[in-house]
Amino acid sequence: MLEGPAIFVLVLLAVVIFYIARAIRMVPQGYNYTVERFGRYVRTLGPGLGLIVPFIDRIGAKLNMMEQVIPVPSQEVITKDNAMVTVDGVAFYQVLDAARATYEIKDLENAIINMTMTNIRTVMGSMELDSLLSQRDEINHRLLGVVDQATHPWGVKMTRIEIKDINPPRDLVESMGRQMKAERDKRAAILEAEGLRQAAILKAEGEKQSVVLEAEGRREAAFRDAEARERAAEAEAKATELVSNAISAGNVQAINYFVANNYVKALEALAQSPNQKILMLPLEASSIIGSIGGIAEIAREAFGASDAATPARRGGVPNVTNRS
């Protein structure tokens, strides 16, 4: 049987153990506990081992200090151009001050949700539908700035607000589809017309270059022809001068050469005429042969033929009468 002093020691030991157990508080990582003394906030316990005064202090609230996400329920919003859309989203926040988040606002998450929904109606209601659908980043940025400023007194930092879905009515979606199709058809027609215009321009440029090159070719050909005619005329003038000098020197064979040469050219022109079908020969053949003989005589004199040549060879060939 235990005696009185032993029982007292055991009771005292149990009270001490109970007192210590009531005084020690383990705070998990990512959480903060508020401490209240007689119902009044006195301090905040951070992660790790914390001590409080048993029976005097108590844990008021256990707050998650990590970043948290809450869904924003869908709601109907009327835009600036009177279009009805259904919108929902998500909000990310983090508690920075446990005491203010506990004692400055009641039901923190519900307050954040309602604050976000209210500002969604305000921000999106000031925009037209086209801007609403194409400027989500701007909507998110404006919402974040407004809601973060409103929740700052609560010891909360809004890190992000994202609009998830914007759903216009079905008839409005169909109208937008028709409008989009018409716009794409318009752009396709413009692109096709632009392509045809570019093709026409390129074709005209090609034809212009072709005409320019052709004109340059004709000019070059005309220049060459004129140059050839000029040289032929110079040669003809030189030959005429030589024949004239020979005639003035008393050389009768030069006259025969000149006449025969022109006579043969005239016959050649008659033979090559497209309207000439039949050419009757001989035509003054004796004159032609005599002229050819004169040409041969001139050639012999030019190349230094012997002075002992016979008079028959120098005078030409026997006369041949023309047969009609």
Image (spheres, grey):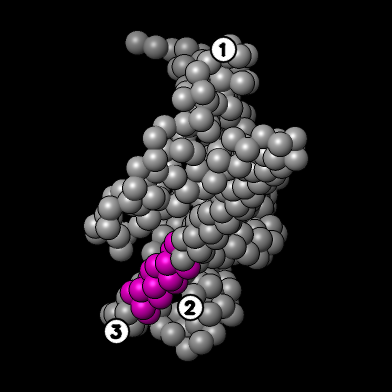
Judged from this view, the residue extending furthest toward the bottom is 82
* Residue 243 in picture, x, y percent from top left: 67, 39
Q: What element carries label 3?
A: helix
Q: What element carries label 1?
A: loop
- Which portion, as a residue range, is magenta? 179-199
Q: Which of 212 and 24 is in front in this view?
A: 212
Residue 288 shown left or right of residue 9 in the figure: left
Front position among marks 3 and 1: 1
Q: Nearer the viewer, residue 288 or 160?
A: 288
* Residue 273 in picture, x, y percent from top left: 35, 57
The residue that label 2 is drawn on is: 129
How much space separates mark 3 and mark 1, taking CA atoms? 125 Å
Q: Which residue is drawn at 49% across and 60% down?
A: 207
Q: Which of 318 and 151 is in front in this view?
A: 318
Image quadrant in which you'd find residue 251: top right
Q: Nearer the viewer, residue 207 or 62?
A: 207
Q: Earlier in the sequence, mark 2 or mark 1?
A: 2
Image quadrant in which you'd find residue 146: bottom right
Q: Which of marks 3 and 1 is nearer the N terminus?
A: 3
